[in-house]
């Protein structure tokens, strides 16, 4: 048995959740926030048999797409700055960050 923790962008979470339902994969869905962009993410926690791990990873890979997005860096309030304004920069967002962990025991009560 494995625990898969998949962090995906909110834009991809509904499609992935639908895929899990169609494939009879039970997942717990948590609303989370990314630290770098402070944007909405969804974290799925999935307990799955070893022989289905690759199937779940493929679903995540197919539904979670990386994309380019502009963001404005936080304003520097340092008074030594000469009033330089922060300009938007293009960053890559989306995709998925996935952890696969071994599980010693699994219980449902």
Image: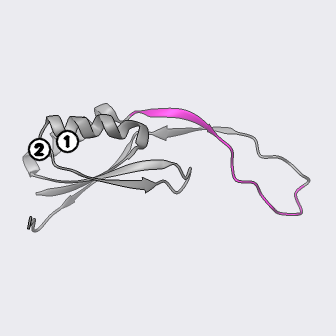
The residue singled out by tag 1 in the image is 56
Q: Is residue 47 above or below residue 55?
A: below
Q: Residue furthest front?
A: 109
Residue 62 falls within the magenta-colored stretch: no
The secondary element bearing badge 2 is classed as helix
Asked if marks 2 and 1 touch (Cβ < 8 Å), the reply is yes
Q: Position of residue 86 (x, y in %)?
A: 77, 46
Q: Main secondary structure of the magenta part?
A: loop
Q: Residues within 10 Å of mark 1 (few under 14, many from 20)?
A: some
91 sits left or right of 84 in the view:
left
Q: What is the tally of numbered marks visible in this picture?
A: 2
Cα distance in 3D space between marks 2 and 1 = 6 Å
88 sits left or right of 66 in the view:
right
The stretch of residues the image draws in magenta is 65-81
Tell me how the rendering is colored.
Answer: one colour
Asked if one can make out residue 60 in the rendered structure from this viewpoint, the answer is no
Q: Position of residue 30 (x, y in %)?
A: 34, 55
Asked if one can make out residue 39 in the rendered structure from this viewpoint, the answer is yes
The residue singled out by tag 2 in the image is 52
Q: Is residue 78 above or below residue 54?
A: below
The residue depicted at 26 percent of the width and 40 percent of the height is: 17
The residue depicted at 17 percent of the width and 39 percent of the height is: 21
Quadrant for the N terminus in the image: bottom left
Q: Position of residue 94 (x, y in %)?
A: 45, 39
Between residue 23 and residue 5, name the one nearer to us: 23
81 sits left or right of 107 in the view:
right
Q: Which of the 4 image quarters holds residue 106?
A: bottom left
Q: Position of residue 9 (x, y in %)?
A: 42, 43
Q: Residue furthest right?
A: 82
Q: Residues within 10 Å of mark 2 (few under 14, many from 20)?
A: few
43 sits left or right of 73 in the view:
left
């Amino acid at each position: 048995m494995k625990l898969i923790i998949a962090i995906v962008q909110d834009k991809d979470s509904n499609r992935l959740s639908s895929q899990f339902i169609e494939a009879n994969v039970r997942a717990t869905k948590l609303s989370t926030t990314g630290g770098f962009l402070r944007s909405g993410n969804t974290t799925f926690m999935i307990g799955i048999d070893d022989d289905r791990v690759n199937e779940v990873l493929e679903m995540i890979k197919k539904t979670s797409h990386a994309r380019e997005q502009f963001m404005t860096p936080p304003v520097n309030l340092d008074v030594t700055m000469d009033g330089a304004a922060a300009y938007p920069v293009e960053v890559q967002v989306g995709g998925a960050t996935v952890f696969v962990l071994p599980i010693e025991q699994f219980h449902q009560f």
